[in-house]
Amino acid sequence: MDNKTFTKNLEKLGETIFKMAFWLLRDTQLAKDIVQETYLRLWEHRLKYSTYTNLKQVALKISSNLCIDQDRRNKRWLFENATEELSASSDNPLQKLEHKDTEKIITQTLENLPESQKTVMYLRGIEQLSTKEIASVMSLSENNVRVTLSRARLAISVAIKKWNNE
């Protein structure tokens, strides 16, 4: 792969890398920095990475690791907007309040998940990656990805049920 093609492929990945970094760090400037650092690392090792069949997986792995490093430095791993508006079209104020409460519970639960579960949830839910792709990005077995995803979903489900029964 020549430099021009490699650069073109990198440009296509920018938005995906930014979304993931923003999802994990909840800071626009840090997310932009992660994108630039990912570009830099990919560029520095372009000869090595040009032989890979899926540059997106490599870029997501690098950016994921950079986000984890950043999190360890400043402990800012937040999920304030973990879910989209559950019912934007609803005109019922009570229903909107319930959705807001549910969103808050999900956000709080996501904040307390281990890093691996947060990352798997993001890659599956937001990036729509397959189990095999997530396993590749995170250097896990496919079975481990399924278990991690299942545990994260269970934690969210238990939190919502607990909240509903209060």
Image (tube, grey):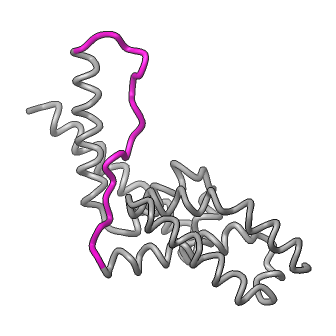
Which SS does the magenta portion mostly show? loop
Say if 143 sits above or below 98 in the image: below
Q: Quadrant of the N terminus?
A: bottom right
* Residue 133 in the image, given as x and y percentages of width and height: 64, 64
Residue reaching furthest to the top: 91
Say if 80 sits above or below 132 in the image: above
Q: Along the horizontal axis of the image, is 108 left or right of 19?
A: left
Q: Quadrant of the C terminus?
A: top left
Q: Image point 41% across, 54% down: which residue?
A: 150
Residue 119 sits in which quadrant? bottom left
* Residue 46 in the image, given as x and y percentages of width and height: 77, 85
* Residue 38 in the image, given as x and y percentages of width and height: 60, 76
Say if 136 sits above or below 146 in the image: below
Which of 72/51 is in front? 72
Q: Along the horizontal axis of the image, is 9 left or right of 27?
A: right
Residue 51 sits in which quadrant? bottom right
Q: Along the horizontal axis of the image, is 37 left or right of 112?
A: right
Say if 82 sits above or below 75 in the image: above
Marker count (numbered): 0
Q: Image point 43% across, 16% down: which residue?
A: 89
What's the magenta region? 74-93
